[in-house]
Image: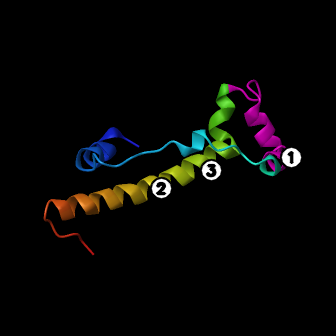
Amino acid sequence: MPPYVFEPLFQRCEDLDFQEEILYDDVPEEVLYKLSKIPYVLQSWDENGMEIDQFNAHPATIATAETFSKASDGLEKYVGERMAVVAGKAVPA
């Protein structure tokens, strides 16, 4: 997401506490086992599993980009609405 989306959020919400829980949570063994049965997952885990030009067409890359794009749209809309409320402007219905 571009910085202009986050900057107003950080300026107005200085008291937000972002925690990096994901760094402390292990992936359950059964999940890793299931993932290890998917060929493109194995390819993505291998440091030499694909050429650079294969990356953008990789199913995991595509799924991540699509999901992130949808989440970004929602976040941008939400932040815009909240900024309008704080600025005292009406939010379009």
Query: Is 74 on the left or on the right of 56, as rendered?
Result: left
The tag on residue 20 is none
> Which image quadrant for residue 87?
bottom left
Q: Is residue 11 above or below residue 49?
A: below
Could you tell me which secondary element the residue under label 1 belongs to?
loop
Q: Amino acid at mark 3?
A: Ala
Range covered by the magenta-colored residues: 32-51
Q: Amino acid at mark 1?
A: Lys
Residue 92, x across and y down, in percent: 24, 71
> Which image quadrant for residue 50?
top right
Query: What residue did someone put label 1 on?
Result: 37
The answer for how far apart the CA atoms under marks 2 and 1 are is 28 Å
Could you tell me which secondary element the residue under label 2 belongs to?
helix
The tag on residue 63 is 3
Which mark is first along the chain, 3 or 2?
A: 3
Residue occupying image coordinates x 78% and y 50%: 31
Residue 91, x across and y down, in percent: 22, 69
Query: Is 10 on the left or on the right of 40, as rendered?
Result: left
Q: Quick check: is 78 in the magenta stretch?
A: no
Which mark is first along the chain, 1 or 2?
A: 1
Between 34 and 42, the one lying in front of the other is: 34
